Image (spheres, rainbow, N blue to C red):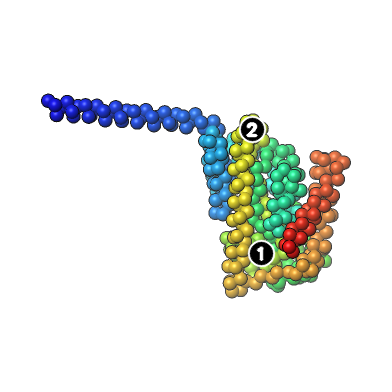
Amino acid sequence: MLHRSFRTGFIGKCLFVMVLMVFLMSLTTAVSAKEAEYKWKFGQTSVRASQGESYKLFCELIGKYSDGRIQVEFFPDNQLGTLDEIFHAVQVGDVELCGVAPYVNLVPGGMFNWMPWTVETWEECKLAFARPNGALYVPMEEAMKEVGMHILFTVSQGSYGVGNNVRPIKTPEDFKNLKMRVSSSLGSVRGLQNMASGTGMTVETVPWGDLYNALSKGVVDGCWSMWPSLVEERHYEVMKFYTSLDWMWDANQVVVNREVWEALPDDLKAAVQKAADEAEIHQYGIQERMASEFQDFLKKQDGFEIYYPTDAERAMFREKANALSIWEELCTPWLEKHYPGQNMTEKILAELEANRVKVAAAKTK
């Protein structure tokens, strides 16, 4: 009888403990669910692995710094639609966050990201897009505000050069009779056309996804490209010569729906921005390191030649590009509309030049 009583008591205690554990687990789940006051989606089109690392980190850090009050689920690789579809979903608030290439058909003021000869080094990029007063951050934030979004951080994959299958491009005259692929980034198109004026170079619009085949089949002779694309999208396989001109700089933005952002309490805004700042630093670090690694890889490839212009040679391209005329054509009308009478073109270009001088001076120390 004693043995049976012991067993009965022991079983009862076990059942009690199990019930208690289930209760505590359900209570913890309920508390966690209660703490997740905001459940957000981050939509992204096709994304390189290196970018994806920083985007995932960003989502995780939002959860960490908000103490679980904001949970963000990351949807890469067109899971939520095309670039245009994701962009419009963020505009209307169906999706809260996305990484966007601000083409002017989506963001009328988005041309500032890709104006030729505005940013030439990583350090200049960091200064130009720094919150809250960077020379290019200011107009880009205004441009995003115009379409109902707020910039959280900038993502860059570095500099653009020019490549082709005919000859090394060492002077503007080397563009002679080349057929070059271009995109809808009008500022870049104007810059390339100006640099090649008088050479008989023609341009052909080819979707980025079709560029590899266009180069391999001779539909175009060359294109602008950058270190990640040369390697990860294998442009080096279908292109013989590449000039590291650093004449244009890649930049995209991670944005949030502005109404969603403005409705957040200040402590959660601070948490999200802290996560954004860390993700931006993380991404810069990855891309700078990989740019160096990509160049080392490319230098070992047979049949692919990299040319690094001298400062004097780059100056020839820069002068012929006539960047001021492109700014006055594309940027000044938009700037005058949003900053009437403030001479913003002159101010932005002066600040970008000051950045260049500052970075150059730091290198000589």
Q: Is residue 353 or residue 163 the one in the foreground?
A: 353
Query: Counting other residues with Cα less than 10 Å from the Cα at mark 1, is it few (<14), some (14-19), or many (20 or more)?
Result: some
Residue beneath the point at 43% across and 31% down: 28
- Check disc 2 and report its element: helix, strand or loop: helix
- Residue 121 x %, y %: 71, 58
- Check disc 1 and report its element: helix, strand or loop: loop
Q: Residue furthest bottom?
A: 302
Is 173 situated left or right of 232 in this image?
A: right
Identify the image quadrant of residue 218.
bottom right
Q: Is residue 260 above or below residue 353?
A: above
Query: Counting other residues with Cα less than 10 Å from the Cα at mark 2, is it few (<14), some (14-19), or many (20 or more)?
Result: few
Q: Is residue 180 above or below residue 339?
A: below
Residue beneath the point at 24% across and 26% down: 12
> Exactly how many numbered labels are in the figure?
2
Q: Is residue 60 or residue 180 the one in the foreground?
A: 60
- Pointer 2: what residue? 266
Q: Quadrant of the C terminus?
A: bottom right
Asked if the residue at tag 2 contacts the one at tag 1, i.e. Cβ–Cβ closer than 8 Å, the answer is: no
Asked if residue 292 shows in the view, the reply is yes
Identify the image quadrant of residue 336.
top right
Identify the image quadrant of residue 70.
top right
- Residue 259 x %, y %: 66, 32
Is 347 situated left or right of 52 in this image?
A: right
Residue beneath the point at 52% across and 32% down: 36
- Pointer 1: what residue? 219
Mark 1–mark 2 Cα distance, whole angstroms, equals 54 Å
- Residue 364 x %, y %: 74, 64
Q: Upstream in the sequence, badge 1 or badge 2?
A: 1
Q: Quadrant of the N terminus?
A: top left
- Residue 160 x %, y %: 69, 60
Q: Give the amino acid at mark 2.
A: Asp
Q: Give the amino acid at mark 1.
A: Val
